Image: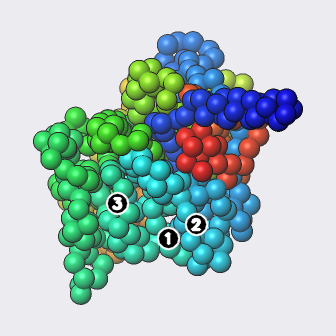
Amino acid sequence: MKKRILSLGIFLLCTLCATSQPRAKYVFYFIGDGMGVNQVNGAETYLAAMADSIGFFPMCFSSFPYVALVNTYSATNGVTDSAAGGTALATGKKTKNGAIGVLKDLETPAKSIAYNAQEHGAAVGIATNVSVDHATPASFYAHAASRHQYYEIGKQLGPTGFDFFGGSDFQKPNAKADEPDLYEQTRAAGYTIVRGYPEYLANRSKADRIVLFQTEEDSKAYRYTIPYKIERKAYNLSAVDITRAGLDFLYNKKKDGFFFMMEGGMIDMACHNNDGPAYIHEMLDFDSCIQVAYDFYLKHPDETLIVITADHETGGLSLGRGPYELRMQKLAVPKASIFQYGRRLRELAKEQGSALTEDALMADAAEHFGFGHGIELTQEQERQLRSAARKVAEVAAQPDAEDSALANACSAFAGAINRTTSEQALIGWQSGGHSNGYVPAFAIGVGADQFHGRINNTQISQFILKAAGWE
């Protein structure tokens, strides 16, 4: 009898201890698309350089106490794409490159942790600074054999019943003429669509569920992302706006906590373009989003978990080339993304035609990228830039020039500008694609101690589910 009573006492004590363990009621999941270890290190080295110091100045998230290195390969490839990488992070399952929320047979659905959170009574938000139907956000709510099925992915947003979505827009809202567009379908599912942060503030209290997009004017200019941070204006929707809106809306739903995934998708795009200045600005912008969550954590430290990771590394970024030094401060000089500048070049060439000269193009590049005003060109860099500018002027002067010829010439000039900026900063790029380099995971809060050593990307969602009690 005594043994039975003792066993019962031990059982009750263990049960009490288990149930009294803190739970991550509020979960933030930040995904820096394309953010490898060197992307983080480079941003911190840049911050030190801007203070005229050698070394690094830590960002908010890289100062978190728990850190792990993450493997990112997919079920079919040594180098993952964002669809397979996002699916692994969302569902804990590896899949074929290009697939969204399904196993590698391209048919079996893989359930994301967002649905687990919803089933346990939490509010759910899925957000990004690119389109809401892009690979990473889509991995948290949709199932598709191909990430390029944008319309079919967008159709799956409304039926989720998730509380908050944020991003630039839908990529293909009007894909089928015999069906209502995605805006109408989303509204029919009970969502209020707002455009811009001021419109969000005006509608948040009366909306049951909400989708935050950029303004229609910005989407007409470019719907696939919000503007790059390096050239963003105060009136443009920002990643920080989206993060603040998501946190505000989810917290005020007064449900049993929340799950909020926010993607920094434009780190990847800048690195695909090997655009050093744009990538730095996107990294620091991403950190500003995390600062919003960290401020919340400081008020709710015993109920909050913040996790930051990436789906893969992009660009094969190297810090240092040639001499054993870096000049990261040079990346502060340019004032435009290379993507947007390429579009500007094409517009200039079409508008000015034969009036566009090599010297005018060099002057325009100097104005936007600081050549001669913070970046002193070598003779070889000057020669290469002038050669590429001359080609643009020659093609623009041809009244019957094909659009493809003009686009190629403008792309070559933009590429020369881009290479020059990287050479000046002494950074290098392996490719315009992804790599199999480690990505980091940083964590703070309830359950953060699970993040240490080397882990696989499929483990991250399991750690979050355990910390939140959403298993």
Residue 243 is situated, as x and y percent measured from the top left of the image, at 35, 39
Q: Which amino acid does label 2 sit on?
A: Ala
Q: Mark 3 points at which residue?
A: 161
- Mark 2 or mark 1: whose residue is earlier in sequence: 2
Q: Which amino acid does label 3 sit on?
A: Gly
Q: Residue at 63%, 37% (x, y): give it.
A: 441
Q: Name the residue under label 1.
A: 143
In this view, 381 is above or below 100: above
Residue 238 quadrant: top left
| Mark 2: secondary structure | loop
Q: Distance between the residues labelled 3 and 1?
A: 15 Å
Q: Residue at 50%, 60% (x, y): give it.
A: 139
Q: Do the residues labelled 3 and 2 touch (CB within 8 Å)?
A: no
- Mark 3 or mark 2: whose residue is earlier in sequence: 2
Q: Report whether 458 appears left or right of 24.
A: right
Q: Name the residue under label 2.
A: 110
Residue 458 is at least partly visible in this image: yes
Look at discs 2 and 1 and give the one toward the viewer.
2
Q: Residue at 35%, 67% (x, y): give it.
A: 159
Residue 69 is situated, as x and y percent measured from the top left of the image, at 71, 39
Q: Are marks 2 and 1 in contact (CB under 8 Å)?
A: yes
In this view, 211 is above or below 110: above
